[in-house]
Image (spheres, rainbow, N blue to C red):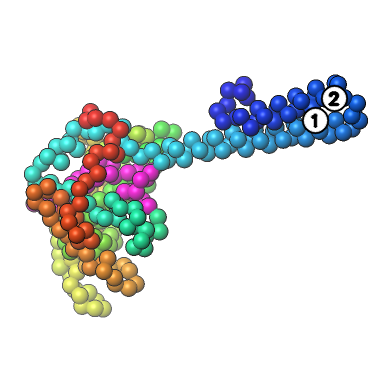
């Protein structure tokens, strides 16, 4: 049975060593205590190497599962968003350019948009007329809680992400020009591991407010969001409030002064750190063709 364990070659090598010691004991004149000690060492070595090898193999497979964030197939409605003239593909540089992200102060991968995310939103499409943000969200095996089902916090995190970014798009001048201050989430139906759902966030109301300290004008944005499948079945809803015009950084830098840019020919909305409109990576985050 041990020989069938993937990656157990070191274990088999240790067993081979024990076999050699045993053969030596039959044909050699070595003292019995020395042979016994050698045999015991071979057995202990085999056990330790075997346990470590099997444990590492399991850990490696878990890491491979976590790193695999590609969506199994592309839902038809994603293609329809791409082709719809009223929807612009959203591109933020720290999502698309890992080297640039690291150079400019980020410490890790994005919780939702980074490669290997437990719950992954590979792209967003924004409709400025409807003040709505839409995209696919994939729940990988790394988001599991109950057996075969994703954690409720994964659903909430995805909705929170969409809620915040639709605030930046609608009422902010660029990325991260605001902060979410209130959330109310309702989990309606469990999400299965490997499932692809449609996430949507829409601005309901905007109210101008005056800052108490700096007197800087801010905008209170009331937003609703949902997770649903291709048949319109609702899995979760969220209502929240974000404040546009808030800067959470201790010191303002050029990153905080970014502005939105629009390429009407390609229907892409991007931030001003790019000198020209970036080209999307295509659909390489999907394993298969449209379902």
Query: Residue 50 placed where, x, y %?
Result: 65, 33
Residue visible at 30% across and 55% down in the picture = 94
What secondary structure is marked by label 1? Answer: helix
Magenta stretch, residue numbers: 109-137
Task: Find the distance from the CA under tag 1 to the CA under tag 2.
Answer: 9 Å
| Of the pair 54 and 193, the residue shown nearer to us | 54
Query: Residue 63 placed where, x, y %?
Result: 47, 40
User: Relative to residue 9, is residue 14 drawn left or right?
Assistant: right
Question: Height in image: 246 above or below 36?
Answer: below
Residue 227 seen in the figure: no
Q: Nearer the viewer, mark 1 or mark 2?
A: 2
State the residue position of label 2: 25
| Of the pair 162 and 105, the residue shown nearer to us | 105
User: Relative to residue 30, is residue 72 drawn left or right?
Assistant: left
Residue visible at 20% across and 78% down in the picture = 215
Query: Residue 70 placed where, x, y %?
Result: 33, 37
Q: Earlier in the sequence, mark 1 or mark 2?
A: 2
Question: Height in image: 58 above or below 171?
Answer: above
State the residue position of label 1: 39
Q: Is residue 27 magenta?
A: no
Residue visible at 26% across and 69% down in the picture = 254
Quarter of the figure with the C terminus: top left
Residue 62 seen in the figure: yes
Q: Is residue 121 magenta?
A: yes
Query: Residue 91 placed where, x, y %?
Result: 22, 52
| Residue 147, quarter of picture | top left
Question: Height in image: 265 above or below 58?
Answer: below
């Amino acid at each position: 049975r041990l020989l069938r364990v993937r990656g157990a070659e070191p274990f088999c090598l240790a067993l081979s060593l024990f076999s050699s010691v045993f053969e030596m004991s039959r044909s050699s004149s070595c003292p019995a205590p020395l042979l016994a000690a050698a045999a015991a060492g071979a057995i202990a070595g085999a056990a330790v190497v075997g346990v470590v090898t099997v444990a590492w193999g399991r850990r490696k497979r878990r890491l491979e599962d976590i790193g695999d964030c590609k969506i199994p197939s592309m839902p038809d409605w994603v293609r329809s968003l791409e082709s719809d003239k009223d929807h612009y593909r959203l591109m933020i540089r720290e999502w698309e350019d890992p080297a640039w992200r690291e150079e400019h102060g980020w410490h890790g991968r994005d919780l939702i948009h980074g490669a290997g995310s437990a719950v992954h939103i590979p792209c967003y499409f924004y409709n400025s007329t409807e003040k709505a943000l839409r995209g696919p969200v994939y729940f990988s095996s790394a988001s599991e809680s109950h057996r075969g089902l994703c954690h409720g916090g994964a659903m909430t995190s995805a909705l929170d992400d969409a809620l915040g970014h639709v605030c930046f798009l609608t009422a902010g001048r660029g990325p991260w020009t605001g902060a979410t201050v209130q959330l109310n989430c309702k989990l309606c139906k469990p999400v299965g591991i490997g499932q692809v759902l449609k996430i949507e966030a829409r601005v309901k109301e905007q109210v101008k407010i005056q800052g108490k300290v700096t007197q800087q004008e801010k905008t209170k944005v009331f937003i609703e969001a949902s997770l649903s499948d291709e048949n319109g079945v609702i899995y979760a809803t969220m209502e929240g409030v974000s404040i546009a015009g808030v800067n959470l950084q201790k010191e303002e830098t050029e990153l905080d002064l970014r502005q939105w840019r629009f390429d009407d020919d390609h229907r892409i909305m991007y931030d001003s750190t790019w000198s020209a409109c970036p080209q999307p990576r295509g659909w390489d985050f999907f394993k298969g063709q449209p379902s």
